[in-house]
Amino acid sequence: MNLTRRTTLQSLAAAALAPALGGQAFAQGATFRIGALNPVTGAGSPYGSGMQKMILAAAEMVNAAGGAGGRKFEVFAEDTQTTPQAAVLAAKKLIEVNKVQAVVGTWSSGISLAVIPLTNDANIFLMNTSGAPALSVPPANAKGLSYRFQATNDRFGRAFAELCEKEGFKRPATMAFNNASGIGNTEGFKKAWEKKGGKVVANVVYEPNQTSYRAELQKVLAEKPDVIVTGSYLGDTTIILREWFQTGETTKWVIPAWAANPQLVKAIGNEAAEGLFAVDSISNEGSPAFSAYDAAYQKAMNQPGLSNVYAAMTWDMVVTLALAMEAAGPNADIAAINKKIREVANPDGAKVSTFAEGKEALKKGKINYEGASSVLDFDEFGDVTPDFSVSRVEKGEIKRKYLVKI
């Protein structure tokens, strides 16, 4: 499984065709097919390769422990290119050609919202790292087969509001990329800020793929905010901050960490980046599950696991799915496995941190898998509530300042 995306896909597809070719194949019912649908290219590319490799690593770990519910995992990998159009085509291939029973690791709300009608129609799982509130409820999650391992936009908004209150800001404004995630982040902040008795002085939604956002920026700056909270991505944030820096304004910025990352600092320079606040959901650091994930990530990527919170989420997706399969029993169908997701992840039960540990503990009773990405207590909508970090750019380095619990 330590192969490139394309090679992995081709080799696994060839394995799937083995019965027709007369080669050795798994016994019928002995495999469970996972579609790794990740942003290997495009705006999500800083995270996508690591996400994909952790799906492969976790599947390898499950198979090494004898499989889940009597079945081994097969992984078929595709690149969403961080665009809904490409993601839909890739998802159709995974579902119709590769016959996957779960799609895992979709990144960005626009992509997950585009893919979920396909997984619903196929009656298979979608496990995502997206924030849009619409993913929690009908029609998107009408079948209850979607699980979110990331914080919702509403939760991000509450974290933004806690930061602004702690830092003493009084006149926030917002700028949002025109998609479900961008708008969801800023609307979540507005709702949380107004609940605290505050007022957002300006709200601007901007269109993607522009060469300049000067007009939108000037509209916001005209209201004299002391901080601008964004729902944005790396490309548009880079342009906006370059144009802001040219104005000489001293407004502060609060930006989701998927946009306020080392690539942003490199693109705009240390002087322009100085003092930016980055907010991110954080992994379940210090837990045994995180240690297992971190070792796998360092082996695969030669980087610390802390560098990619989304990869920790995809690791947990595979482990959670495998534990639910084990709890459901040999060759259980999707409905039976789905009934076990919360049972293996939520309290009460024996706390476990790896698939092998959970598999053994299930022989004695109920388990509670506390994951690498969060403690993974799914609510009735299939959502989790991780903790958040607040970091600040200082002399070109993104340094964590404190944690926010909501």
Image: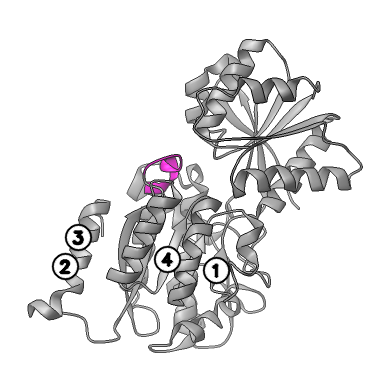
Disc 3 and disc 2: Cα gap in Å? 6 Å
Q: Is residue 340 left or right of residue 216?
A: left
At label 3, which amino acid type do we have? Gln
Q: Secondary structure at mark 1?
A: strand
Q: Which residue is pictured at 80% across the width and 48% down the height? A: 191
Q: How many marks are shown on the rendered structure?
A: 4
Specify the farthest residue to the right: 197
Q: Secondary structure at mark 2?
A: helix
Residue 266 location (% of width, % of height): 48, 23
Where is mark 3, residue-wise?
10
At label 1, which amino acid type do we have? Ser
Residue 135 appears in which quarter of the rendering? bottom right
Residue 339 location (% of width, % of height): 56, 83
Q: Could you say which is closer to the camera, residue 259 or residue 389?
A: 259
**What crowding class fits label 1: few (fewer than 14 Cα within 10 Å), some (14-19), or many (20 or more)?**
many
Where is mark 2, residue-wise?
14
Return the disc, 2 or 1, that comes first in the chain's sequence: 2
Return the disc, 1 or 3, that comes first in the chain's sequence: 3
**What crowding class fits label 3: few (fewer than 14 Cα within 10 Å), some (14-19), or many (20 or more)?**
some
Is residue 57 part of the magenta span, yes or no? no
* Dot 3 and dot 2 residues touching (CB under 8 Å): yes
Return the disc, 4 or 2, that comes first in the chain's sequence: 2
Q: Secondary structure at mark 4?
A: strand
* Dot 1 and dot 3 residues touching (CB under 8 Å): no
At label 2, which amino acid type do we have? Ala
Which image quarter is the N terminus in? bottom left
Which span is picked out in magenta?
A: 41-49
At label 4, which amino acid type do we have? Val
Where is mark 1, residue-wise?
146
Is residue 48 part of the magenta span, yes or no? yes
